[in-house]
Each structure stands twice: as structure tokens, then as C-alpha cells.
Image: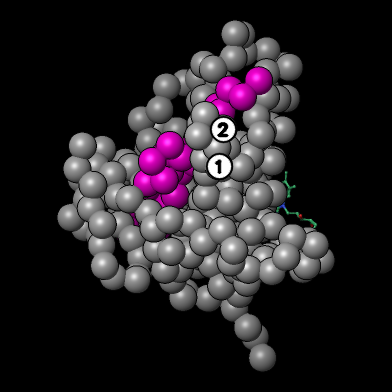
Amino acid sequence: MIRYIFATATIVFSAITMSGEEISMLAPEKSAGAPVMEALANRRSIRNFSEKELSRQQLGNILWAAKGQNRPDGRQTAPSCRNLQEIKLFVFDKNGVSEYMPSTHSLRHVVDGDYRNLVAAGQESVNVAPVSIVMIADMSKFDKIDERALMMASADAGIVSENISVACAGLGFATVPRGMMKSAEIITLLNLPENHIAILNNPVGFEFETK
Ligand SMILES: Cc1cc2nc3c(=O)[nH]c(=O)nc-3n(C[C@H](O)[C@H](O)[C@H](O)COP(=O)(O)O)c2cc1C
């Protein structure tokens, strides 16, 4: 598998990536940002984004906070039901969609093209965000797909989303947890099996200051 390490500080998925290729993210800055209580004090939903892009480092920090590997045994910053780790993270930006791979802290290119509108689903203010992170549950990880499994997957997605929200609050980025998105179209776009469900998303970027 080919890995590219780009020297540039700017984002992220250049046109040279092809489906399945991985881009290593820079190591997460584990001392960055405000203390956790201050981050919680600042957390709020922000829906007005500027077009300013995140750097690769900034995006990597957020993805690691969301569900990065934080222990040698493969466990992650986000707990999950029976450690099933059924939530997959997909990053939509103006160039394409990539999947975050926690074990290698890398992005695996999935598809070219700007599909952020499938995530925004008509909420135009969030369509401006440079990236949208989509939480998709791989329900095949559960023994059976029943109401309980759907509840656990929703809880797990909510935890990942809140990790993103708290990280953004602490690091000075804008985000909002969202249920709205074109879920079926996203599953089709990403060529995922039917047992995958898009549960939540977080557009991430910088707040558009109106003053
Ligand atoms: C599960 C969930 C789904 C949400 N879906 C949306 C959404 O689709 N669009 C949106 O603008 N906000 C959405 N929100 C954000 C809520 O509207 C917001 O959290 C709430 O108004 C409280 O505001 P606060 O986050 O600033 O405390 C969602 C929040 C949660 C927890």
C-alpha cells in the first residue's frame, strides 16, 4: 500500500490520490488546545462557516480526537459497545471522500468529487464548511441487527460526534452535530453494503464572523 507524506501544510486530498490509496496524517498534537473543562464551557453548535480550509495537522487532530487509536491494543478515544468499533468515519471535502483509518492514523481515498452537498442536504450554511465528517455504522459487527443494535450504534456515533464537538471547541474550530443528510445516497456513493447506516455528521471548519 502506498503512503504519501506531503510537506505542505494545506489540505489534504490532492487530485493525485486514487481509490484505495492512503495518506498518512501528521501525528496528533495531544497537548493542543484548551483544557477539557474550558472546551466544554465553550462548546456550542456553529452553523455559519467561512471557506477557510483546515490544515492537514488540524484535520488530523480532529479525526484522532473523534476516534483515533489511543492504546497499543487498538482501542480508541471513543468507547464503543463491546469495543465493536462499528462506526466508520468518512471525510467529505471539495476534492472527494476519504475514510479515516484509526489503526494507521491515515486517510484512505474512496471517491473523487465534491459531494458535501449530500451531507448538507439543503442546509446551505453548512455546505460551506471545508470538511464534513460522516459517521457510518457497519451493522455487520453486531450479532443481529435489531432495535438494541441500532440503539447501541446510535449511541456510539453520538459519542464520536461529541468527541468532535469538544475537540473543535477546545481547538477553536466550528462544528455542529447533525442528523440531517442524504443517507441512502451517501451509502450508494461510497459503495457500502446495505448493512451500513449513516447516522450523524459534523461539518467542521472556521466560524464565519458577521461583524
Ligand atoms: C442527534 C442530533 C442531531 C442533530 N441534527 C441537527 C441537524 O440536522 N441540523 C442542525 O442544524 N443541527 C442539528 N443538531 C444540533 C442541535 O440543534 C443543537 O445541538 C441544539 O439546538 C442545542 O444547541 P447547542 O448544540 O448549541 O447546545 C443535532 C444535534 C443532535 C444531538
- SS under mark 2: loop
Give the residue displayed 66% in from the left and 91% down from the top: 211
Mark 1–mark 2 CB contact (< 8 Å): yes
Q: Ligand 1 within 8 A of label 2's CB?
A: no
Within-10-Å neighbours for mark 2: few <14, some 14–19, many 20+: some
Which amino acid is tagged 1?
Asn
Give the numbered dot on residue 70. 1
Front-most of residues 109 and 94: 109
Give the residue displayed 40% in from the left and 27% down from the top: 192
Front-most of residues 187 and 205: 205
Q: Quadrant of residue 53?
A: bottom left
- Farthest residue in the top direction? 143
- SS under mark 1: loop
Which amino acid is tagged 2?
Arg
Give the residue displayed 73% in from the left and 17% down from the top: 148
Q: Which residue is mark 2?
A: 75
Range shown magenta:
82-106
Which mark is first along the chain, 2 or 1? 1
Give the image location of residue 149, x and y in percent: 67, 18
Give the residue displayed 23% in from the left and 53% down from the top: 4
Quadrant into which the N terminus falls: top left
Give the image location of residue 193, x and y in percent: 42, 22
Front-most of residues 128 and 38: 38
Q: Quadrant of residue 14?
A: bottom left
User: In this rendering, is residue 159 above or below 124?
Assistant: above
Q: CA separation, marks 1 and 2? A: 6 Å
